[in-house]
């Protein structure tokens, strides 16, 4: 399967990598052990936000702490889980595509030098598991999930730019092919759509059994209100003393 993908997408993968090489050169990057351009640092920073999906999970968790954004938080959290199930648990080990900088039978002769130039050679990333891009899947799942669950979609269109920036950074850093990123966008979107319906089911179930204390707590808990109550209780105790 990996060999077929290499062959089928060779043209677009090579064309985009050639563009990235030109962009890196324009930004002042040169082959060697040290990163010299601000642009490369920026790509690494963008890439960091979806490393292992941790920041995306954190976003979902924070949103779940507030009653007004609980639906958003659940959808984001579940979407990242669904995206990870599709990409990291299923497709990556099944397809086992070699990453571009190590795939000498495909494009490594073209991209390996640039991979060293942008600093990825110093990272201990596995050379197997290029397809799809896990970072792109995670970013797409979180942002599309956030968008789908929101009632104010007109205000959230800009968040959909983030998955494309994530994919761009992964190609620039030579750890993924363009085809990996496109697959990540699709996998993340599927994960977000699944999460949207799962979230609706979870909230409906909680509402149906609201009379139970645990279910009511899950629906009504708000960290701000909790802090206010604790603060008021402390002030009341201090006054009595």
Image: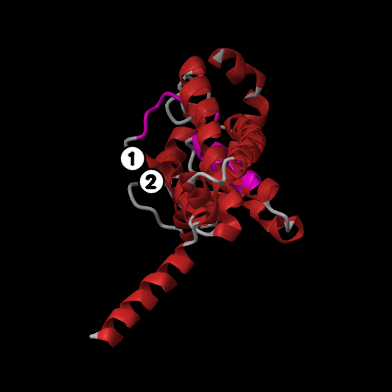
Q: Quadrant of the N terminus?
A: top right
User: Would you identify the image quadrant in which residue 83 lies?
Assistant: top right
Instruction: Give yes or no for residue 56 being in the magenta stretch.
Output: no
Which mark is on residue 123?
1
In the image, taking residue 9 as reference, residue 212 lies left or right, namely left
Magenta region, residue range: 125-145
Which residue is under mark 2? 119
Image depth: mark 1 or mark 2 in front: 1
Q: Looking at the image, which residue is at 33% across and 82% down?
A: 235
User: Would you identify the image quadrant in which residue 204 lies?
Assistant: top right
In-front residue for pair 72/182: 72
Instruction: Give yes or no for residue 137 being in the magenta stretch.
Output: yes
Among all residues in the image, which is located at the extreme right? 154
Q: Looking at the image, which residue is at 33% across and 47% down?
A: 33
Seen in the picture, residue 94 relative to 16 is either above or below; the reply is above
In-front residue for pair 235/73: 235
Q: Looking at the image, which residue is at 67% across and 48% down?
A: 149
Q: Looking at the image, which residue is at 47% across and 51% down?
A: 61
CB atoms of marks 1 and 2 within 8 Å: yes
């Amino acid at each position: 399967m990996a060999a077929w993908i290499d062959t089928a997408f060779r043209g677009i993968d090579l064309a985009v990598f050639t563009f990235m090489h030109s962009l890196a050169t324009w930004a002042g990057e040169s082959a060697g052990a040290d990163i010299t351009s601000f642009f490369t640092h920026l790509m690494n920073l963008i890439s960091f936000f979806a490393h292992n999906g941790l920041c995306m999970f954190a976003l979902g968790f924070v949103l779940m702490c507030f009653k007004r954004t609980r639906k958003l938080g659940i959808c984001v959290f579940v979407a990242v889980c669904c995206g990870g199930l599709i990409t990291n648990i299923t497709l990556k080990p099944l397809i086992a595509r070699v990453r571009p900088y190590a795939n000498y039978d495909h494009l490594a002769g073209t991209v390996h030098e640039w991979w060293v130039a942008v600093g990825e050679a110093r990272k201990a990333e596995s050379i197997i598991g290029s397809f799809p891009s896990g970072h792109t899947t995670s970013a797409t799942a979180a942002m599309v999930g956030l968008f789908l669950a929101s009632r104010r979609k007109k205000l959230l269109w800009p968040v959909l730019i983030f998955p494309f920036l994530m994919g761009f950074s992964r190609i620039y850093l030579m750890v993924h092919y363009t085809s990996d990123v496109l697959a990540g966008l699709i996998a993340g979107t599927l994960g977000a759509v699944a999460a949207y319906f799962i979230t609706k089911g979870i909230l409906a179930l909680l509402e149906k059994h609201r009379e139970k204390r645990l279910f009511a707590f899950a629906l009504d808990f708000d960290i701000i209100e909790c802090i206010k109550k604790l603060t008021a209780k402390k002030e009341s105790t201090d006054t009595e003393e």
